[in-house]
Amino acid sequence: MATRTPPARAWVLPLCWAAVLLDGFDLVVLGTVLPVLLREHVWDLTPGTASAVTTAGLVGMMIGALVIGAVTDVIGRRKALIIAVISFSVFTALCAVAPSAAVFGLLRFLAGLGLGGCLPTAITLVGEYAKRGRSGSATTTIMTGYHVGAVVTALLGIAVIPALGWRAMFLIGAAPALVLVPLMIKFLPESESFLAAERSAAPKSGVRTLFAGGLVRTTLAFWIASFMGLLLVYGLNTWLPEIMRQAGYPLGAALSLLLTLNVGAVVGLVVAGYVADRRGIRPSTITWFGAAAVFLALLSVKLPSAGLYAAVFLAGCFVFSAQVLVYAYVGRAYPAAGRATAMGAVAGVGRIGAICGPLLGGSLLSAGIAYPWGFYAFAVVGALGAVAVTMVASRPGTEPAEAVDVPQGARA
């Protein structure tokens, strides 16, 4: 007889989705305000110093992602996620009153610590509570929050910056935590695998999980793929408006293209989850990286307006979903006890790519060759991501995440 979804389980996806939405805000907010900061010479900012400020936040995200596995082993995934949301929301709000580029960069670093821990923890929780056979769709569904946040931020940038200034963007982005955090405290359940480990008092395997049982090649392949995927995500979201301005488009059109990119991301995520659950996670991930490379290369060509928006939309469909499919693949490639550590490590190493993306874009802009050479460079990165995924080793003995149901004690 079918059973109803337990109330605690029903809260996992919406609460984690909302947390990831706020993470998505952070993904795009610098892309919306950097053209203004550069045009108005705020703090005498240049493309080089803007890249340094961006890098500070990304370094914080990298550190947060790398340590989150150890943190969740001690305090659990529920508490870790709540603390992460509180942390990045407070420091994001403080960015609105930053008096200098140095302070702004420091606040971005501190916010990055929480942001880096948020995404892998939320993905792991949602994957654990996903219905049987739906782990791919569950991962891509939660990541729609990431890009809904990015779309909302791009829309806010168009409406808010001219009226209220760039500082208002950071206050608006932090405000939803005032509602989300109390809801998480009241309704978000703890990870069942964490509770089971606590009851059994089993020793923590930690990072050894990443390299045990023939997983060395798989771990390295995932690290490379995640590096390439996040290089694309952050490089494009940080610098696409400015690259399009270099190509001769006005700021409003450039921000509209950023919006189009992230609308494409949301659509791509829905399609990617469906395809991955039915056609397989491995071929889907390879295909998505390859298609991303094709459409990024196409952006280097001068297109009529409709063709340009279509190419940007399709690039968004594949670029962002490719990285999310990497996360879904990680959830199926490692044993249950090691998934949080594996997800944190893959996200953390990927953050190095996230640092390199804005640096690459900033360097090309400083050299005056961001258009069209930036798109050629990004296309090569997408192709390398596809190659990396082909190197993930097949492990028939590994139990796929989608076959792991919620433990008996969690069912109503």
Image (cartoon, rainbow, N blue to C red):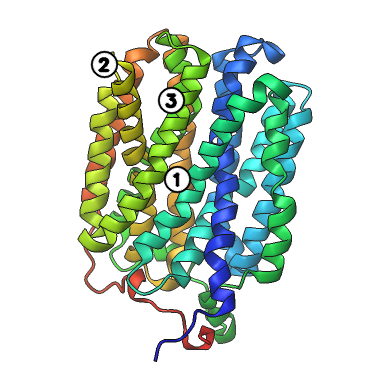
Q: Position of residue 362 (x, y in %)?
A: 48, 19
Using a 10 Å C-alpha cutoff, classify the residue at mark 3 as few (fewer than 14 neighbours), some (14 to 19) or many (20 or more): many
Q: Amino acid at mark 3?
A: Leu
Give the numbered dot on residue 257: 3
Question: Mark 2 sits on what residue?
Answer: 301
Using a 10 Å C-alpha cutoff, classify the residue at mark 1 as few (fewer than 14 neighbours), some (14 to 19) or many (20 or more): many
Above/below status of 399 relative to 82 = below
Question: Mark 1 sits on what residue?
Answer: 349
Above/below status of 18 relative to 388 = below
Name the residue rendered at 46%, 51% in the picture. Answer: 143
The kind of secondary structure element at disc 3 is helix
291 displayed left or right of 15: left
Q: Earlier in the sequence, mark 2 or mark 1?
A: 2
Name the residue rendered at 58%, 40% in the picture. Answer: 25
Q: Earlier in the sequence, mark 1 or mark 3?
A: 3
Q: Amino acid at mark 2?
A: Val
Q: Amino acid at mark 1?
A: Val
Q: Quadrant of residue 158?
A: top right
Q: Position of residue 84 (x, y in %)?
A: 65, 53
What quarter of the picture does the N terminus occupy? Answer: bottom left
